[in-house]
Each structure stands twice: as structure tokens, then as C-alpha cells.
């Protein structure tokens, strides 16, 4: 392993820990109770539209029981709506509710405010370049490892929403 890859791996660990902290801070400041998997569910519904819980689980590479638990809580809070699938009345379709859209908007605004306070010396060009590199990185690490063909392939939400194939 190269030194640069070791540095990337170490920084990824630090980033994961900090992202959890940032999520806790954002939800506290926004006064919203929302677990990270629930946020992923809401974001996926916003980007991809109404769908079955099993499709959400596949997209998010989460166990269906995790998605079901999140959906139950989100439905109780009025953030998602369930209805019977018109093509298969045994199945359900979930969609983002207006309250769910409002929560996503609040979380995004609060996240941007919190990041802005931490990155005052970053120019728009630097932020845009970083966002582009981060999107590329996310797409590349979403590919299954060649030595693990049975590993689920996860697609970044932005690519999945656009119907694009991973690179």
C-alpha cells in the first residue's frame, strides 16, 4: 500500500467519526430527531421518488429490517406516506410527505450553515473542486472489489437518482 493510500484510509476513519458528530450537531441545532439511516431514506425518496421498501433497502445497501424500522418511525412522524402498490396490492409503496421535504430542507440549510462556519477560508472554486473529487471518490469506492464478487454494489445516490451507471 502506498503512503498516500494509507493517508486516505486514515483520513476516512477520521471523516466517518466527524460526520457522525456533524450529523448530531446539525440535528440538535435544527431541533430535529433524525437518525442517519432515516436521513438516507428521506434523501433517497426525494431523489428517486416513491418506491417499495425493498427497493430502498437495495439502493441504500441496508437490511430490509433496518429500512422498515426507519420507515415506521418516519411514518409516525408524518415524514413519509405509505400506500398500496397499484400493481401488487400485497406490497406497499412509500413516498416522501410534505413534512419530510420540510425536514430535508431544514437539515440541508443547517448543515450548510454549520459547514460554512467551519470553512470560511475556502473559496467557491476550492469547494467546487473538492465536491467534484468527493463525488468521483464516492463513485469509485462504490464499485464492488474484484476479489469479492458477492459484495453488494452500492451506487452513490446522485448517480442512482440520475439513472447513471457507475464508472
Image (spheres, rainbow, N blue to C red):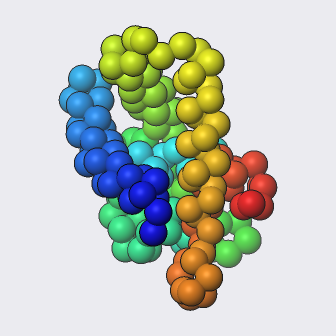
Quarter of the image where one finds residue 23 = top left
Q: Residue at x 33, y 19 (%)?
A: 118
Is 112 placed left or right of 25 in the picture? right
Q: Quadrant of the C terminus?
A: bottom right
* In this view, 24 is above or below 89: above
Tell me which corner region of the image, top left, top right, bottom left or bottom right, holds residue 67. bottom left
Residue that appears at 58% across and 15% down: 124
**In the image, residue 77 above or below residue 30:** below
54 w.r.t. 161: above or below = below
Q: Position of residue 32 (x, y in %)?
A: 28, 32
Give x and y (percent) for residue 137.
58, 51
Please name whichever residue, 62 or 100, is drawn nearer the observer in this view of the structure: 62
Residue 92, image quadrant: bottom right
* Image x and y of residue 69, in percent: 33, 64
Spot occupied by residue 139 in the image (x, y as percentages of width and height):
63, 55
Is residue 83 visible in the rendered image? The answer is no
Relative to 113, 101 lies left or right: right
The residue positioned 46% from the left and 33% from the top of the image is 104
Closer to us: 103 or 6? 6
150 vs 30, left or right, is right
**Residue sitting at x 40%, y 11%:** 120
Amino acid at each position: 500500500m502506498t503512503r498516500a493510500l494509507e493517508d486516505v484510509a486514515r483520513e476516512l476513519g477520521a471523516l466517518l467519526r466527524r460526520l457522525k458528530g456533524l450529523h448530531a450537531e446539525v440535528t440538535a441545532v435544527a431541533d430535529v430527531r433524525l437518525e442517519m439511516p432515516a436521513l438516507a431514506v428521506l434523501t433517497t425518496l426525494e431523489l428517486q421518488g416513491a418506491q417499495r421498501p425493498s427497493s430502498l433497502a437495495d439502493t441504500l445497501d441496508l437490511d430490509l429490517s433496518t429500512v422498515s424500522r426507519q420507515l415506521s418511525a418516519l411514518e409516525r412522524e408524518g415524514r413519509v406516506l405509505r400506500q398500496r402498490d397499484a400493481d401488487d396490492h400485497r406490497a406497499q409503496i412509500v413516498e416522501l410527505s410534505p413534512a419530510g421535504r420540510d425536514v430535508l430542507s431544514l437539515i440541508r440549510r443547517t448543515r450548510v450553515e454549520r459547514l460554512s462556519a467551519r470553512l470560511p477560508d475556502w473559496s467557491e472554486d476550492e469547494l467546487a473542486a473538492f465536491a467534484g473529487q468527493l463525488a468521483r471518490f464516492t463513485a469509485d469506492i462504490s464499485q464492488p472489489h474484484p476479489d469479492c464478487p458477492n459484495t453488494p454494489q452500492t451506487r452513490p445516490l446522485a448517480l442512482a437518482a440520475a439513472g447513471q451507471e457507475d464508472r
